[in-house]
Amino acid sequence: MAKKKSLYAELTHRSYSRQKDDNGNRIPQLRRGIEAQLPEHPFLEDWGFYYQSFFRTAVNELQKGKTEDQIEKEFQERFGIEWAWSDSLSTDAKARTDQLVTARDNRISELTKDIESGWKTVAEGIEDLENRLKNPIRKNLQGFEKKLLGLKSKALRLTRKQAEKDRLLKQKRLHVCFGSAKLFNAQHHLEVNNYQSHSEWKIDWEKYRSGNFYSVGKGKVAGNNPVAGIFYEGDDNFTVRFTVPGFLREDYGQYVYLTFEITGQRKHDLLYALSANKPVTVQCFRREHKSDKWYIHLTTYVQDVPTISSLKNGGLGIDLNAETIDIIYRKRDGNPFRENDKQVILSFPIPTGTTGQKEAALRDIVCEIVRLAEIYQCPIACENLDFSVKKAQLRHSGSKQYNRMLSGFIYDKFRSFLVVRAEKYGIEVKFVNPYMTSVIGMVKYMAKYGLNSASAAAMVIARRAMGFKEYIPHSWLKTLSQFFAPEDVKDGGFGGGWRRISDWLRKYAIRRSRLFQPDTVLRFLLDSLIAASPKKAKRQRGKFTATATSVATA
């Protein structure tokens, strides 16, 4: 089984070229995407239609057991196309097939966790209702039927999800709709979807499935691409030279030339890639929402940006929660940095709106974070959260805010934008273990530095990236000594001691604002814990007090 990539490895645009430096080390490089609009030309429509037809055939052949090499050789003769086009088709089809396999595996894993967590919630709900029936007073029976109906609905949903999981496990063939599932279903409801006839719908269907083709780049060939070469014409103008497939040459000749414009930094990136013989992969596609205009997207590589950030300069911590994105800067010693007698703290609301609006707002937030890291020349620390696990845990919590948060869109996009932007400016991004960051922040730093809970969690994240351990405060160990285990004294932030504190805060419903008065909270917890287990507390009081009093202040 292949080793799972780290989160950073999945997000980074940094890779290593085959070229080596004088010391024999492979040279790092950054992937760049460059996009421009193409002028209208009938070749784009024709080849886009045939390419997608061949592509769908290639995906089917892969599912039948054929290899990329077999498809590459077969398609040259079968469809009368050049080796490079056939190679691009097989590569593209293999990538799509791998995506489908990964998506199916991820869905099975998500369903497994969701079903397990859901039935646990149902069992807890049934137990609660049974306890209410044991004492059927008016208060206990209030809302009883509504909750029972909710549990029934949840059980039915979980049953359907179990059926979906079983179907996926038995499924031997990958299923994919080439086009749009919504548009495909529209053929069965023509009038509702503003179609006069099935033939009218079919025109849109074929158009939606045809506007795309792809060519893998290769260095040290003319134009850095075998069949879609890119050439600089001067000023801001570039030309793409498409090698026309053999069966279309009667209509278009051997080559089709199209000119496009690229300006600014992207122009310099492309010129570097062309001069350095970097491969330029070309993808051409039609955008229906932009009057069916055709665009060209170039993927290539540029020089890596040297890292300017260092832990010697401290670190920025980022906490992502249901409502805000909170950032805080900490010095190398882990303590606050004050500028004009104020701590460096930023807080941004989670973006809302359309997909485009949310992406634009996220990019603005990321730009501000990277700008701050550039000023202090420090790395950025973020939680390494597995949202598939988090979704399963909180989907059944009933919190609408967390359900929106766990849609994954905002957080996946944020981390992706952050890594790419930081790499462009030489800023390192560190992903740290998120274990108990919120609880540690509230207990240790919220009252001490006058922070809110999110900023306190961000402080823990920054300190964790800098290598600091978070020991339980001496006052907690001393006051509640009889309820801690001996090993909790050495809990540096990942042990059972912090888990115990988290359970106590949840069990006794201690609000975050109350932690600004730690002495009051400790007295309340001590009284509550003693009342819950008086014999155990009395028996162990002396044993653990002696251990706790020898601990230095965390």
Image (cartoon, grey):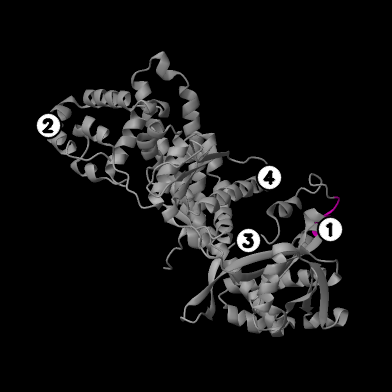
Residue 109 image offset from top left, x and y in percent: 46, 54
Look at the image and tell me whether residue 171 can be seen.
no
How packed mark 2 is, by other alpha carbons closer than 10 Å (few <14, some 14-19, many 20 or more), is few
The mark that comes first in sequence, 4 or 1, is 1
Type of the residue with mark 2: Gly
Q: Residue at x 53, y 62 (%)?
A: 12
Q: Which mark is residue 357?
A: 4
For this orientation, the residue located farthest to the top is: 138
| Residue beneath disc 3 | 176
| Residue beneath disc 2 | 542
How packed mark 3 is, by other alpha carbons closer than 10 Å (few <14, some 14-19, many 20 or more), is few
Residue 349 image offset from top left, x and y in percent: 58, 38
Q: Which residues are magenta?
A: 196-203
Q: CA distance from mark 3 to mark 2?
A: 66 Å
Residue 73 shown in magenta = no
Residue 370 image offset from top left, x and y in percent: 56, 52
